Structures are given as C-alpha cells and as structure tokens.
Amino acid sequence: MALWKTLARLTGAAAVVALAAGMATNTAAAQDSVTIGYTGPLSGGAALYGKNTLSGLEMAAKELNEAGGIEVGGKKVTITIAALDDKYSPSESAVNAKRLKAQNNAPMIFVPHSGGAFALQAFNEQDNFILGAYTSVPSITERGNKMTLRIPPSFLGYVEPFLRTEMERFGKKLAVANADHDYAKAWSQAFVPAWKKAGGEVVAENPMSYNKDTDFYSGVSKVLASNPNVMFVGGASEPTALVVRTARELGFQGGFAIMDQAKMDEMARVLDGFDLLEGSIGVMPLVHDKRPGAEAFVAKYRKLYNKDPGSEISYHYSALHAVAEAMKLAGTTTDPKAIYAKLSEAYAKLPPERNPSRIGGVDEKGGSNAKIVVGFVEKGKIIPIEANPGQ
C-alpha cells in the first residue's frame, strides 16, 4: 500500500520520456503498438549514463518503426519506449516499474543498474513482465528468477584475460585499490581469489570511496608502498582516471586491471589520451572494436547523436532488436513468458549490424552469452585480447 501511495505522489512529478518513433508514413491505417518500459537515472549525477542507455533503446525503436514496425501474428506493430527517471534509486525503480506495468502493460522493463534490477526481481514474475537488467553481476541470474534477462555477459568472463595478460607482462604482485561500493566488492571477491589461484600475491588491499573522494593521493600512496606490479582499480570512469593519474604521478610504472564499470575511452578523455593508461586492460571500447557490426553501429550512432557510443548503448540497442525478434517468433506482444522463451533464438538470428555487442544467445538462467574480447593498451593503442583463447 505504501508503494502505491508513493506512486500516487510521484505521478504528477515524474518525467515520462516517450518515443513513438513514427508509424509508417505511407498508410493511413492505424497500427498496433507495444510499449517497452525503462526506469533509470535521467537526472542527477548519473543522468548522462542513464540517457546513454536509453538512447540505445530509442535508436533501435526508431529503426524498427521507420521500417514499418514488426510483423507479429499477421499485424504490423510499432514500438514505444516509455521512460521514467529513478535517480539511480532502487526504491524509485520499483515504483516506476509498477507504474509502467499498470499504465502501459509493458511486457518488458529495462533498468540499467544492479540495485534497481534486484528491486524489480521482488515482483516482476508476479506482475508478469520481463526484467531487462543491465548489470554484469553474475548473481542477478543465480536467484531463480525465470523472467530476468541479464543483458551484458557476466564480469566473471573478464577475470581470466585480465590476470593472464597483466601477470605475463608485469608480474604477480597485485595491489587492490578499487572502489568500495557493493559492485566493486563483488568484483574483488572474484578477482582476488583467482589472482592467488593463478600463483599471484596480493600485497595490498585499500578500496577507496570513488563516489565521494576527489583526492586519492593518500590511498594510492598506501598501496604503492607495497611495491606492486599491477594495480586492480575501478569505479566510475572519471574517478578511476584520477586514481590512475595519481599512481603515475607517484612513479608507478606497472599495469592496471580496470573493472568493467570504468570505460577506458572515457578515462582517456580525462587523461588527455592513452599514454597514462599504458599497460592497462579493461573493457574493449566500442569505437576500437573492429568486429563485424561494431563499426557500422558506431557510424550510425555518430550520425544520429554526434558523439561516440559506449558499450552500454550497443548492448541496449541489441537487446531491443532481440526483443522485437522474439515477439515475431512468439507471435505475441502481450505474453511476456512466450517472448522470454524466444529471446535466445532471437539473439542468434540477429545480423551483425543489429547485434554489435555480439550476443550469441541466452543461457537457461537468463544470462547473455558472448565471446568476450577485452582491450589492452600497448604503445598508446588498444589491442584486442580474447578471453580463454583456443577454447
């Protein structure tokens, strides 16, 4: 009851961003429409991230609608994106999702942060909608929820290429200096034991408050006193860049393993290039990905938005195209369970230009599968490194 009182209070204030990207202009006949929901940060400090993820959905909807919509059960259907601002608050995410389902009967609701995704898992099965969770935390699909799609691959796939590459090039002494929030803790819980199992040594552990601090001199000095070969860092891109800069200014010449929340291309803009990132390994920036589909997507996005897309944009773009294909395969826009059952097949059918994130399918727990390629900075350029080569 309290949730619905909060919902009523917010009804007049919450911003709704709706994209109904055109019905076919060459016909006067009305078409059916399906509304896809989105709840994410559209104001506040994370607004840029939220708007970026939303733009991936909007771009896919625009393409589908300009092509005349999708044919489902013999009818042409257009796609509307209804977006609500949750200010990065899980409780606001829950209120928004309830509203999107009640008012729009959305068969799927996207949320681009793990806190919101976990909040929606409390009721998405009961309310009968697919949760499109943009989080690489593996536990999101380990909770038995049968209506969750984890959009990016699990971050566990990054651990092997990260430690293999950094150990081979720099050595086995690791200093942990990443952020102190829950997502960073989950990363550490996976990365640190794997480093030790591979024969490495953890010489320092000093997580820092990336979201609050602006001066990392003391924290970085503390870990560098242990003389590490590699620093494990990561939080939001800007503070991660400041940690890297501080380490270089203090004389650190080793490598950086950068958890996937931070994006190296965004860090490079703060650092005036990739020079200070020499020897770093992290998520492959989409604009440096030369695989089929990625270059075409980057060109299209630049034309529409006059800026470079990040990987989170391409994942949302691919996800909506997969949802549209799943609706076609299932023959329905109103039965979320039937649509969900076709998602893996739908991803596999997408051509590279509609699947720049290269998702090959969805596993039995709802996690997306992709062949992971990470980026390593060498002589100022980003080179691709495959995860588990030869397998």
Image (spheres, rainbow, N blue to C red):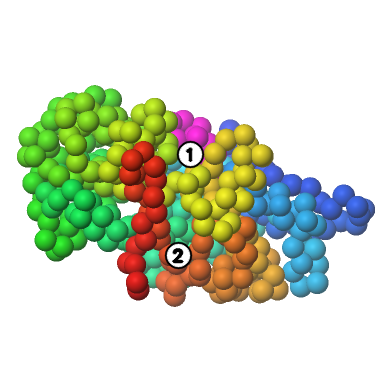
Q: Residue at x 49, y 34 (%)?
A: 47
Residue 338 picture quarter: bottom right
Query: Looking at the image, which is closer to me, 175 or 171?
Result: 171
Q: Is residue 167 left or right of residue 121?
A: left
Residue type at mark 2? Ala
The span picked out in magenta is 38-53
Q: Is residue 329 above or below residue 222?
A: below
Q: Is residue 238 left or right of residue 84?
A: left
* Residue 179 visible to an observer of this rendering: yes
Q: Which residue is mark 1?
A: 49
Residue 17 placement (x, y as % from top left): 64, 40
Q: Which mark is residue 342?
A: none
Dot 2, how many residues are within 10 Å of its Cα: few (below 14), some (14-19), or many (20+)? Answer: some
* Residue in the image at 39% along x and 27% along y: 272
Q: CA distance from mark 1 to mark 2?
A: 23 Å
The answer, for residue 95, to whether it is visible in the render is no
Mark found first going from the N terminus, 1 or 2: 1
- Residue 210 lies, with reference to residue 281, above or below; the image says above
Q: Is residue 54 magenta?
A: no
Q: Secondary structure at mark 1?
A: helix
Residue bearing mark 2: 370
Nearest the camera: 290 or 91? Answer: 290
**Residue at 21% over, 51% down:** 169
Q: Position of residue 69 (x, y in %)?
A: 76, 58
Q: Is residue 176 left or right of residue 136?
A: left
Q: Position of residue 93 (x, y in %)?
A: 48, 47
User: Element type at marker 2?
Assistant: strand
